[in-house]
Image (cartoon, rainbow, N blue to C red):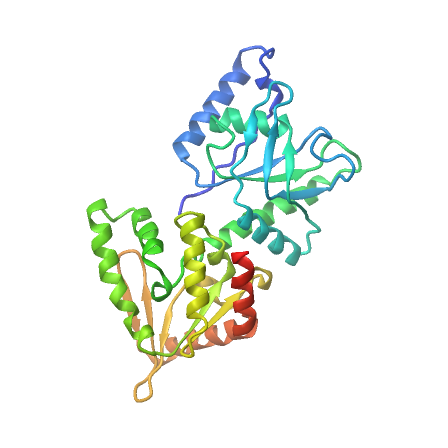
Amino acid sequence: MKNRLTVCSSHLITLPSAPHGPVRAAIATAREAVAAFDPELVVFFGTDHRRAFRAVVPTFAVVLAATAQGDVAGPVGTYDVPSELGRALVANLVAHDFDIATAYEAALDHAFGHTARDLLGEINARPVLPIFINCASPPHASFRRAASLGRRVGEFFADKRQTMLLHGMLQIPEYMRAVITACANVSDDEVEERIAARIPRQEPLRNGMKAVFFIPESVLVNSVGGPEVMRAQLLHLEKLATRPNVVVRIVALTAGAHAGMAGSFDMLTFDRYEDVVFLESENSSLIIEAPEPVKAYGRIVEGLDQVALDAEQSKELIKKLLM
């Protein structure tokens, strides 16, 4: 997972009438840094000049769909906003006591447009999640409160790194393909071979093996393979959740910190043998048999059981995500 790149930039100096010089050169340097970093997502904190919000001016707002007004020689067009991710962020912020507004649509002015164009090339060159901060219409939030918001947003995306994928037994081939293709240590000619090797691993589940899956909601809003693949994956998960041998329990974003955030694992229980835990990483795997470590993972399962939605609530959440 990539580290974060933070860029703090003004927008006024990019006006055609603005003088050339060190500031323009600094913007060019920042643009090169962004291109080299190659971000998968841009979280854009910005303001407006009482153009996007007039009758009601929120202190903070997460924007779920956005266009550019084209004012002050700014760009026009539509931003590529990952709306489901935005909804997940709003739920998380509310759960952490931020009275954040949800802007289902907003025509953002040049405060967003200039900077997005100058740092990304085009406003739709990258997925952008706009977060509005009121700086134009008093009263304003304090610097402390704005900093707290930024810190929590950063923690939200850090939490998402903990568990980013569905369990392999639940994955459809298209989802697998997106995951394997993105892997830094798999060559292109290995992708289909690895998919073919993974599919038979799902056979025990199809044959009636009992399984309980605890799934962070953040995994379900992470658009692996794009919207079409993710929708097909959610439909598959919805179908699996109706099987008598499969229980799906979703850990909602509103649960906040929970016992399973250290990473994913499989706990295997048997009628005639002792429980074991299976861990898998990028290039290695480990089976834990020692009683005390296995008991420690058992306590994690107990912690997840306390905070996860029940099976019916989880099915309802999957249906909601499919709407």
Q: Is residue 177 left or right of residue 264?
A: left
Q: Is residue 307 left or right of residue 103?
A: left
Which residue does the image show at 56% across and 66% down from the upper left? Answer: 316
Foreground of the two, 300 or 91 = 91
- Image coordinates of residue 44 in percent, x first then y, are 57, 37
- Image coordinates of residue 123 in percent, x first then y, are 52, 30
- Image coordinates of residue 126 in percent, x first then y, are 47, 36
Q: Is residue 32 left or right of residue 8?
A: left
In which image quadrant can residue 170 be found? bottom left
Foreground of the two, 5 or 315 = 315
- Residue 164 makes an appearance in the image: no
Relative vertical location of residue 242 with respect to residue 108 in this rendering, above or below: below
Residue extending farthest to the bottom is: 272
Task: Look at the image and tell me in which quarter the C terminus lies.
Answer: bottom right
In which image quadrant can residue 284 be found? bottom left
Foreground of the two, 168 or 241 = 241
What count of labels does the image hold?
A: 0
Which residue does the image show at 48% across and 57% down from the upper left? Answer: 220
In which image quadrant can residue 68 be found? top right
- Image coordinates of residue 238 in percent, x first then y, are 46, 66
- Residue 109 makes an appearance in the image: yes
Relative vertical location of residue 225 with respect to residue 19 in this rendering, above or below: below
